[in-house]
Amino acid sequence: ALLIGTGIFALAAHHVLKKRIRVSIEKKPVLSIVVSSLVMALCVSGYQYVIPGTNVFLIAGAVVVGMLIYSLLLMRLDGGIRDEVRDLVTGIGLPWPGRL
């Protein structure tokens, strides 16, 4: 429900703002985010099917699995997003893994 509400709000804002300023949606980053989200949802659904969330630790495990799959896949699919995250991470003094 939150995703649908946010999507509707973004489309409405785009409709209103396009009359006043030029707003362009970058297709490649949006496609990368959508693909990463779908793969994450499939993996977490499979995790929940194999390991039902009967306690808080198993549910937290599903969240961690989803976070890792989403983040790693997004970094692999979109170099622009990866570079922005790398700049943020190294900007605050944390090391950046070379494989990403």
Image: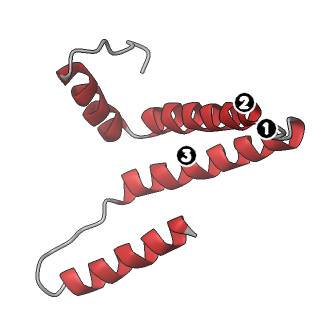
Q: Position of residue 95 (x, y in %)?
A: 31, 12
Up-down relation of residue 88 to residue 78 (above or below):
above
Q: Position of residue 28 (x, y in %)?
A: 39, 53
Residue type, label 2 = Phe
**Residue at numbered disc 2:** 57
How far apart, in angstroms, are the residues tagged by discs 3 and 2? 24 Å
Q: Nearer the viewer, residue 48 or 80?
A: 48
Side (left or right) of 25 relative to 73: left
Q: Secondary structure at mark 1?
A: helix
Q: Position of residue 80 (x, y in %)?
A: 30, 39
Q: Position of residue 45 (x, y in %)?
A: 77, 47
Residue type, label 3 = Ser
Side (left or right) of 98 relative to 42: left
**Residue at numbered disc 1:** 47
Q: Residue at x 53, y 72 (%)?
A: 4
Residue type, label 1 = Tyr
How far apart, in angstroms, are the residues tagged by discs 2 and 1? 13 Å
Of the numbered discs 2 and 1, the one sitting upstream in the chain is 1
Q: Residue at x 44, y 78 (%)?
A: 8
Of the numbered discs 3 and 2, the one sitting upstream in the chain is 3
Quadrant location, the C terminus = top left
Q: Nearer the viewer, residue 7 or 22?
A: 7
How far apart, in angstroms, are the residues tagged by discs 3 and 1? 16 Å
Identify the mark at residue 36; answer none if there is no mark: 3
Up-down relation of residue 75 to residue 93 (above or below):
below
Of the numbered discs 3 and 1, the one sitting upstream in the chain is 3
Identify the mark at residue 94; answer none if there is no mark: none
